[in-house]
Amino acid sequence: MSGFSDAALEKKLAELNNSQQSIQTLSLWLIHHRKHHASIVKIWLKEFTKAKDSRKLTFIYLVNDVIQNSRKKGPEFRDQFGPILAPALKLMGQAVNDENTQKRLERILNIWGDRNMFDSKQIAEFRKSLESCLKRRFDNGEPPVKISRRDRSESREMSENVKENKEQEDPVKIKKERRKSECNEVIQFDKEGKKEVHITLSPKLPANDAPEPEELIKALQILENAASSDGVVRKKITELPAEVSDVSLLSKISDQAQAEALTGKVNEAVELLNDYNGRLLKEMEDRKSVTKMLHDFTAAQKELLVQAEERLQEYKEKLSKVYQVREELRSHVSSLPDFSQLPDVSAVPLPSAGDLFSLR
């Protein structure tokens, strides 16, 4: 991808539109350059403030996409955007001029709350910032206007990725188009003007969010140190004296001192076993979680495999056409006259100027 600079980001934000492809492409670029998260958020806020009211919602959608898709890689964007979203939403509240935009903003806040993108206190602060401006405007006699049917249809592309009249289309064509849409082809240009093409295969699982390989590896590494593999603790448990677990041996206690000594041993055994049982319980939950992660990861990889095979077949067909063109070109070249077979005229002297203009 192209390198990061303040000017490059400002240019990309200026070119940002409300299409899903535009938002996802810029989001992918920002996540790739997440080490510049502080500069990114600062420039985003500056450009958001300068943007026309009609474009502010697109900036909010961009933040939503970046925060959600970068959470597995790190909390940088969430932590950096958190403090500035309240004032940004306050400006957004001043820019809202229709009920549909207000509902979209409410939906984003609901998603952030449901998916724990921000804590409840932050979500409440965001709502307060947004609703305070809305309430003030409406109390001053500025009711939300109803957007036109044309505007509603234009904005529907960003919030709903649903095509109409699907039932009338060829099912095979629909499947191919869906597969193709799942392969995001991102084209960027570097500073020298050289084109770079990056193809990303994206699994679209209906209900599960496939883990990143790094996340899965980390979860498996945690299981390597799980309770069931803790030989030290298991050895301590096996070496516990028999009297702490055998009631029949209590009859051998003859005085208070022996009873107190056994009580101490029993308490230590209870503490040891409670702690180990708690660790085993946690290990069971971790293993269930890893099992689900493996299932989702496997399903995602199968989906990616299908996409890769389709992409491979597509490029095989392109390669076959290139081979065909090459053969046709060779055939055409071979049919051209061979100038080496023409008579050599270099030995024949050219007439001089006197010969050309001599009178006879």
Image (cartoon, rainbow, N blue to C red):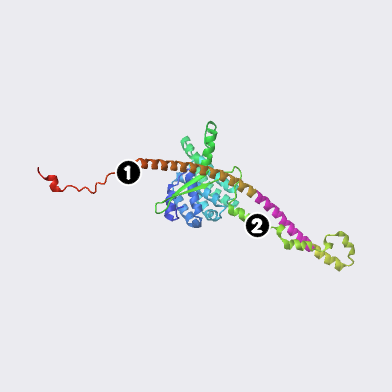
Coordinates of residue 10 in the picture (x, y in percent):
43, 52
Query: In the rendered structure, which amino acid carries the disc numbered 2?
Result: Ile
Mark earlier in primary sequence (2, 1): 2
Between label 2 and label 1, give the one nearer the viewer: 1
Name the one closer to the observer, 99 or 325. Answer: 325
Please report contact status of discs 2 and 1: CB closer than 8 Å, yes or no: no
Query: In the rendered structure, which amino acid carries the disc numbered 1?
Result: Asp
Coordinates of residue 209 in the picture (x, y in percent):
59, 47
Question: Considering the image in quadrants, where does the C terminus appear?
Answer: top left
Name the one closer to the observer, 205 or 255. Answer: 205
Disc 2 marks which residue?
A: 222
Residue occupying the point 63% across, 49% down: 294
Residue occupying the point 51% across, 44% down: 312
Q: Residues within 10 Å of mark 2 (few under 14, many from 20)?
A: few
State whether residue 59 appears in this view. Answer: no
Magenta span: 267-291
Disc 1 marks which residue?
A: 338
354 relative to 252, above or below = above
